[in-house]
Amino acid sequence: MITLPSTPIDERTKPEELWRFLRTVVDAVRELQRQPLAFGKLVTDVALADGVATPISHMFGRRARVFWSPPQGAALIEEVRDSNFNPDKFAVLRASGGDAVLDVVLV
């Protein structure tokens, strides 16, 4: 949690107070950077055709963890792991039971 100085920061603020505040900000940012979703990617309105493997680019340089919203349309959404797409650059989803539109989070 970031604690703000009790008085406004101006030319009269003591250097040690500025450094203490800066350290709390840096610590808070570092903590956020450790969270997986800090570097995630949200892709909205992904359209999946029934039975078609659809690549979604992420460029993480590693296999992404894939989460998706409840689909509009298809009965089933699955992640395809045996596709011709490089998993370090793409996640691949396929709809079954009809076309679908959904939001995808890649982390």
Image: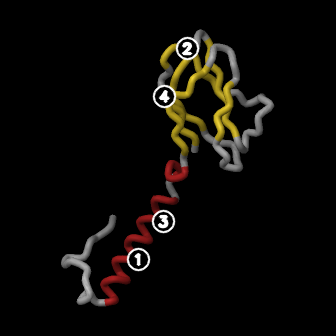
- Residue with the mark numbered 2: 74
Residue at disc 4, secondary structure? loop
Can you tell which mark lies on residue 69? 4
Task: Give the amino acid at mark 4.
Answer: Ser
Can you tell which mark lies on residue 44? none
Q: Nearer the viewer, mark 3 or mark 2?
A: 2
Task: Give the amino acid at mark 1.
Answer: Arg
C-alpha distance separating marks 2 and 1: 49 Å
Residue at disc 3, secondary structure? helix
Question: Please, is residue 63 above or below residue 55 in the view?
Answer: below
Alpha-carbon neighbours of circle 1 within 10 Å: few (<14), some, or many (≥20)?
Answer: few
| Between discs 3 and 4, the one toward the N terminus | 3
C-alpha distance separating marks 4 and 2: 12 Å
C-alpha distance separating marks 4 and 1: 38 Å
Q: Quadrant of residue 99?
A: top right
Task: Give the amino acid at mark 2.
Answer: Ala
Give percent across and percent down for residue 13.
26, 87
Residue at (35%, 81%) from the top-left corner? 20
Q: Quadrant of the N terminus?
A: bottom left
Can you tell which mark lies on residue 23? 1
Residues under numbered marks 2 and 1 in contact, where contact means CB atoms less than 8 Å apart: no
Residues under numbered marks 3 and 2 in contact, where contact means CB atoms less than 8 Å apart: no
Residue at (54%, 44%) from the top-left corner? 41
| Between discs 4 and 1, the one toward the N terminus | 1
C-alpha distance separating marks 3 and 4: 29 Å
Residues under numbered marks 4 and 1 in contact, where contact means CB atoms less than 8 Å apart: no
Q: Nearer the viewer, residue 55 or 87?
A: 55
- Residue with the mark numbered 3: 30
